[in-house]
Image (cartoon, helix red, strand yellow):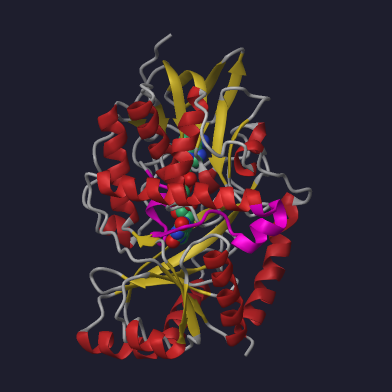
Amino acid sequence: MNRPLKTPPLAAYDPHYDPLVSDGPGCNRDYAPTYWLATAGAPPEDDGPITRDVDTDVAIVGSGFTGLACATFLAREHGVKPLVLEANRVAWGCSTRNGGQGQNASGRLTRSQWIERWGLDVAKRLHAEICDGFDTFEDMIRQSPVDCEPQRGGHLYIAHRKRNFEKIAAEANVLTDVFGEPTRVIGADELRRDYLNEAEAVGAVLEPRGTGVHPAKLAFGYQQMARAAGAKIHPGSPVTEIEQHGSVFHLHTPGGTVKARAVGIATGAYTAPGLTPLLRGRCMPILSNSIVTRPLTPAELDATGFRTKLVLTDTRTLRFYYRLLPDNRVQIGSRSSITGADADHPRHLQLLIDGLHRKFPALHGIEIEYSWWGWVDVSHDMMPRIFQSERANGLVYALGYGGNGVSYSAQAGRRMAQMIVGQQFKGQDLPTFTSPLPTHAFSSFRRIGQRLLYRWYQLRDEAA
Ligand SMILES: Cc1cc2nc3c(=O)[nH]c(=O)nc-3n(C[C@H](O)[C@H](O)[C@H](O)COP(=O)(O)OP(=O)(O)OC[C@H]3O[C@@H](n4cnc5c(N)ncnc54)[C@H](O)[C@@H]3O)c2cc1C
């Protein structure tokens, strides 16, 4: 039965939202106050909230990079016109809040850790899949009708201590010699001369694949590509529950029930425990905070020695990710707060400001014009999954990128589309496609451990 309902009003952004203590990301909430959304221009058209019961072949839950990429590939390459259901505004989650660093990675493990975990053959094939994913990401950037201001040339991994330099230099050799990825070790003098004058840097590694993007512009580009291909995108339509009735899934939203023969879940760290029992406790939502300065003056550019616009990260366990943006502002982010309730405490902002000052003393006192945060989906074994459950045949999820999803989410969306239509692909037997996200016996107590770990990481990271 069709029951036309009223469009929900736009609700205010909630800075204290916390996926572990909330029963969902809300309904039709406004965007986080990011630099990206302030400079992306007006959001493109969408198809408005669900206002009646609807039947469809495929429903995608979540309209971040993953959901929108999946919808684009389904419509373009498989002739399926999916419905994308988004709780809030389009790409409201991580995809409009991140650092925009597209790296040749997914998950948090190094290539050496892949070899330890799965052996050389699987590690090499996983590397091929991630590289193919980077190409998919670059293709999406090139095809995007919105220019997302790509900053290409690689990822510069900057050592903040000598012991860390030795470690990343050894890993660079593995990347070059074992995986054939020409990775360069750069000494402190060359770094200062050719890249930037970062006060605490002792050396760096240049990974050849890495592209910085304006993430909100890219998300808006994905949105336009998905709709142009025939997908419908419905913001303000949170799925409160997914029920399976035989071969049909019923996705309940406040405006009506969507009945679908297949479902793709792309809800990132914003996945509510009640959405489906298949995902309960399988990801740990972790907060990441970010700031953007005002544009640097010519004198400040000179003093900081910025000669590069490459994407940058440092070697802290609670690493800083940063770069000089096209308009000469500096963006820098890291992890500090643990709960949503505490996310706007000034000490988390101060941690980023202190980090900026330590790296670039000349920026002491520079105005911070934007500050925001968002939730990252970290899986319990630090690797993502794009997985089709036998328990709910027809339901596929793509989650767990661990803060490394800007590039790989394009490929994850592509793979999710292939799995939904039953198309085989190279590498489908890799563990990221054949095993579910692991659960954790003590997942509800992990925040206690996280607090202690953060303290320990901070002491270890700053030790001389
Ligand atoms: C501050 C920050 C910095 C980051 N920096 C980087 C970086 O520099 N490089 C990098 O690679 N990665 C980074 N990441 C991670 C990266 O942004 C994500 O991995 C990437 O955007 C993938 O997003 P996604 O589409 O899977 O999820 P998201 O973009 O989070 O989208 C999920 C969407 O699902 C919606 N949703 C949830 N539940 C429901 C429901 N029940 N019904 C309907 N809709 C629902 C949410 O509202 C949300 O819009 C960062 C993340 C944060 C928060």
Place of residue 105 in the rendered image (x, y in percent of width and height, measured from the top left) = 51, 56
334 versus 428 height, above or below = below
Q: Residue furthest right?
A: 441
Q: Residue 357 appears in which quarter of the rendering? A: bottom left
| Relative depth, front residue between 112 and 247 | 112
Picture mark count:
0
* Residue 99 in picture, x, y percent from top left: 41, 62
Position of 155 with respect to 139 (left or right) is right
Q: Is residue 199 magenta?
A: no
Q: Quadrant of the C terminus?
A: bottom right
Residue 18 showing in the rendered view: no
The quarter of the picture where residue 245 lies is top right
Q: Position of residue 368 (x, y in %)?
A: 34, 75
Against 459, is 224 above or below? above
433 and 384: which is toward the camera: 433
In the displayed orientation, state which residue is furthest to the top.
Answer: 1
Q: Which residues are magenta?
A: 91-120
Name the image quarter holding the N terminus.
top left
Q: Would you say residue 95 sits in the magenta stretch?
A: yes
Which residue is at 29% across, 73% downward?
329
Q: Is residue 29 visible?
A: yes
Q: Position of residue 446 (x, y in %)?
A: 72, 57
Name the foreground residue: 33 vs 324.
Answer: 324
Relative height, residue 246 to residue 353 (above, below): above
On screen, 139 above or below 246?
below
Q: Residue at x 31, y 82 (%)?
A: 306
Nearest to the observer: residue 59 or residue 30: 59
Q: Residue at x 73, y 63 (%)?
A: 449
